[in-house]
Image (tube, rainbow, N blue to C red):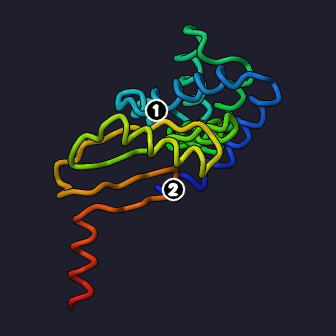
Amino acid sequence: MAENLTVARPYAEAAFSFAVDEKKLDEWQCMLQALSEAYKNDYFRDHLKLAANSSAAADSLISLLKPANLIDEHGENFVKIIGENNRFEVLPDIYDEFVRLRQKHDKCISAQLISARAFAESEIKLIKDKLAKKYDCTVTVEQIIDKNLIGGAVLKVGDKVIDASVRTSLKNLSSTLR
């Protein structure tokens, strides 16, 4: 959701900035992923919502991750701030935004290629090369087969979408003819 992302972005930026300064990008990414996964768990999410207060919920989340060494003292402070502001619901968005910031920092982007059929490796390499040249970074492409597409493809890179699907072309043609 756009609203969650708006709330999550400052938390992710603060965590990312701290992780860069402390040279602990891997640790923070791992910790934020663990927090995100914990919140996505229905049982644990319900447990957080039923806690006596947000401080108790934060302590519960910390006690879940601490025995597995998935959180350090700075991470505990981060969780406590999230708890004080009662923003547990944005933990998955904080993680996603942190990953996006890290990819930008590492000069790496991910793209999704959605099509009705599988593309040949040579075609994917051509797409990767063009994206790498355009964005001046390393590119990974995830290929997704969507049988609902008649033909063509949809390429998603960050928040940009290039829709060259037959379905969209037909919709555009239909609206033009009306």
Q: How far across and how far down the image is residue 107, in percent?
A: 66, 38
Residue 5 against residue 96 in the figure, above or below: below
Residue 34 against residue 146 in the figure, above or below: above
Front in this rendered view, residue 26 or 178? 178
Q: Where the C terminus falls, by quadrant?
A: bottom left
Q: Which residue is mark 2?
A: 159
Q: Which residue is mark 1?
A: 39
Please name the residue shown 50% across and 38% down the image. 92
Front in this rendered view, residue 77 or 30? 30
Residue 100 figure quarter: top right
Please name the residue shown 51% across and 56% down the image. 159
Q: Disc 2 to disc 1, how far (Cα)? A: 24 Å
* Residue with the most extreme right position: 21
Mark 2 neighbour density, 10 Å: few (under 14) some (14–19) many (20 or more): few
Please name the residue shown 46% across and 27% down the image. 38
Front in this rendered view, residue 79 or 14? 14
Residue 41 figure quarter: top left
